[in-house]
Amino acid sequence: MTMLDDRTTAAAWPTAYPQGYAVVDVETTGLARDDRIVSAAVYRLDAQGNVEDHWYTLVNPERDPGPVWIHGLTSDALEGAPLFPEIAAEFAARLDGRVLVAHNAIFDWQMIAREYARAESTAPVRQRLCTIALSKQLSLPLPNHKLESLAAHFGVEQRQAHNALDDARVLAEAFRPSLHAAAEQGVRLPLLECRPLTEWAASPAPSPYPAYRTNGWRPSRRRPACPYPNPGRYEAGEPLRQGMRVAFSGDTSVDRELLEDRTVEAGLHVAGSVSRLTSLLVTNDPDAATSKTLKARSFGTPVVDEAAYTQLLRDVAPADG
């Protein structure tokens, strides 16, 4: 693969590509919606992926720091750190006007969005780019989608894994050649919309390390049973109908729990898996080889993206009878 030469980059660079990036890494107390950020780092890059500057801060999570064995930050180390509202303005200045880039970007974005919502503010981020999705589009020969594998592919040295500043540096150094490869191949960047989280209600105090015990992205949540019978599959051009079973797969712009809440409020059933009874699968990556997308293909389950689904949610037909 031949990268674009620095001397020709400006002339050959795709005009549709963003004008700047903020490569972000956050370390957290866990993986659930009530977990908090304990450290954050941002590398600002120009349009061609060159580093402009970097920034790092500890954050006092006001709770147990969680998996110290992973991020190495103890309660003592975080005791004198600023609270998130105290660093929110500086963090926002680093993100403003740029595409947020992260490895598994949905996680970093949701953690950041929740912190800003708690602080009664919003992050100035309109789009994000996941380097896992970009590596898939480039068909990079990686054994897995870990950051260390992406770094090794581009010869980037990891010095301190799970340190936010070093992880952001590693990702910035690996993102630049990825970006140049995408430009050379004419690849459309996998940009997704970031909608600031404006609805926030704290859940009851979480138990220690809830996500590490359940291997989930958020605590399990019992929802009331859908009161309407399943009317069957969604048909293109028709409205959704109360009682339909809707499954979700992959990265979403809207916080997943809020999207599921709106689904339930509309009288639809949130399905945790895809079966022959599933009315509709919502995914922004229908070609991904996930268990849900593969089952949807095998069952012939209709598939729509998030944007189309949010439009359909605006006018859900009442249940039959």
Image (cartoon, rainbow, N blue to C red):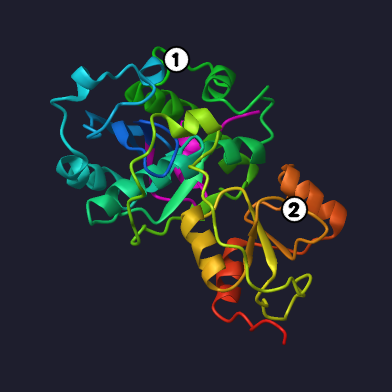
Q: Which residue is mark 2?
A: 274
Q: Amino acid at mark 2?
A: Val
Judge left or right: residue 130 versus residue 91. Answer: right
Where 223 sits versus 26, above or below?
below
- Residue density around tag 1, few if under 14, some if 14–19, many if 20 or more, within 10 Å: some
Quarter of the image for the N terminus: give it: top right
Confirm whether residue 118 shows in the render: yes
Where 233 sits versus 155, above or below?
below
Residue at coordinates 67% horizontally, 62% vertically from top-left? 246
Judge left or right: residue 101 versus residue 300. Answer: left
Stretch in magenta: 1-23
Residue situated in front as seen by the camera: 6 or 40: 40
Q: Amino acid at mark 1?
A: Gln
| Lower position in the chain sequence, tag 2 or tag 1 | 1
User: Image quarter for residue 168?
Assistant: top left
Q: Which residue is mark 1?
A: 158
Give the secondary structure at mark 2: loop
Q: CA distance from mark 2 to mark 1?
A: 39 Å
Labelled pair 2, 1 in contact (Cβ < 8 Å): no
Quarter of the image for the C terminus: give it: bottom right
Q: Nearer the viewer, mark 2 or mark 1?
A: 2
